[in-house]
Amino acid sequence: MAAGSFFKTLTSSDKTTTRTLLHENIPITQAILNGTYTKAAGADSVSRELNVKSFSHNMFVSVYDYPHASSSANHVFDMSVGLASDHGLTVDPTNGAATKEKNIYNQMAQMLVGYDTNGAVRKFDMDGDFTAGSHHKEVAFFNFSRLLTKDEIKKGTFSVTFHTDKLFSDTFHSSPSNATITVADTGAATAYKVNSPAGEYGILKATTADSDTTDGTQAIKVDNSEDKVGLIFYQAGIVVLNLGIFANSGSGSGAGSTNDMSLRLITTDSDGGTADVGMNSSNHSIQKLIEENKIGAITDGIRERMKSVTFNNTTELNSTIYFCRANHNEFNYSSNPTYLENSKIRVKANEITTPSRSYVTTVGLYSADNELLAVAKVSEPLRKDPSNELTLRVRLDY
């Protein structure tokens, strides 16, 4: 330290701030999504894999990477279904499931897209401009755990792939075909939206790995690779996927109402049996999907079709960097009691003509009222004498 001084005041020129974005790749494989763990009846009496937790309220299900009762299980995401109040389906308004689906849609819309100038809750807009146009009115929600998304999902990295095998059976998981549909936020890194109270979001588009056919041999046909089938909210970690991708929209609105995009969905009833809702059923419409199935059954059917989910998460690291400068005439002495021995500087021994010197081992950052806030240690003592100067770079992350 400088003679006669214990502290050196840092000015604005001695500090700066930085922002660093760290990314991790998050692969959610089919082994987690379905077909790995044995099944058991959940809280809603439906048989599911042990890593999928259901609830008696039947408003959503939670997916874990291990059986959910295990102490090592980590929450991966929640799944639910929502209906806009003007969805256009003739579902009985007294139906309990339909009422829950409307409440869930309204709750998520309030949080993610907010209100219009008249105070009404906006609907999920297909192109995100909130002007006159199409909306996502029958949707599935995927709410990813903060453990995975961190501060946000990195734009342009999200992708979810679904199997499109026409025939779904117990052998599906061991030998699925290569026919798939992929939903991704392609191009969102430079074309995302910012008009949401929940932060930034992107448009999800669908592409298929198999060629378009009309002879019924494929379970899905995508006529346009730019079909807008959902939205992804990056900071919230929520995906909104149009149910039109899972059943032809014979009535109501959705991606399937104008584009032939149908994916055979198998749902499970309370007795453990399966029912066709999709290709090869007598009525493969969203109408039938919503009418005859509770939320848990619909989410089970979607999850059974999922092959993989991948994205990069983002951790925002903010730092303040302090440049602690010791000029040639500063910090050449020490107030440590052991610095002197018999009125002599211990580190000089008997070299009387040698200039005074000290060894820097620690940097302390103090508040304006001289309270110690942070301490930084150097890897080895640094010699300081009148013939040299030091600049120590101290970084505080938060």
Image (cartoon, grey):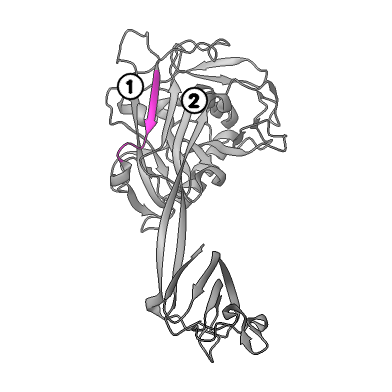
Depth order, front residue of 98/351: 351
Tag 2's secondary structure?
strand
133 w.r.t. 225: above or below = below
Position of 233 relative to 177 (above/below)? below
Left or right side of 374 for 125? left
Give the magenta range.
180-187
Of mark 1 and mark 2, the one earlier in the sequence is 1
What kind of residue is marked 1? Answer: Asp
In the rendered image, the vertical position of residue 13 relative to residue 44, given as above or below: below
- The residue singled out by tag 2 in the image is 306
Question: Where does residue 93 sit, x and y in percent of width and height?
Answer: 53, 36
Give 91 or 62, whichever is nearer the viewer. Answer: 62
- Tell me where residue 249 appears, x and y as whole percent: 39, 25
Secondary structure category for the residue under label 1: loop
Q: Image quarter for residue 292? A: top right
Please indicate, yes or no, whether residue 77 appears anywhere in the rendered image: yes
Q: What residue is disc 1 on?
A: 260
Reply above or below: 325 against 45.
below
Q: Is 105 on the left or on the right of 124, as rendered? A: right
Q: Could you tell me which residue is drawn at 32 percent across and 7 percent down?
A: 215
Query: Residue type at mark 2?
Result: Met
Within the image, what quadrant is residue 206 found in? Answer: top left
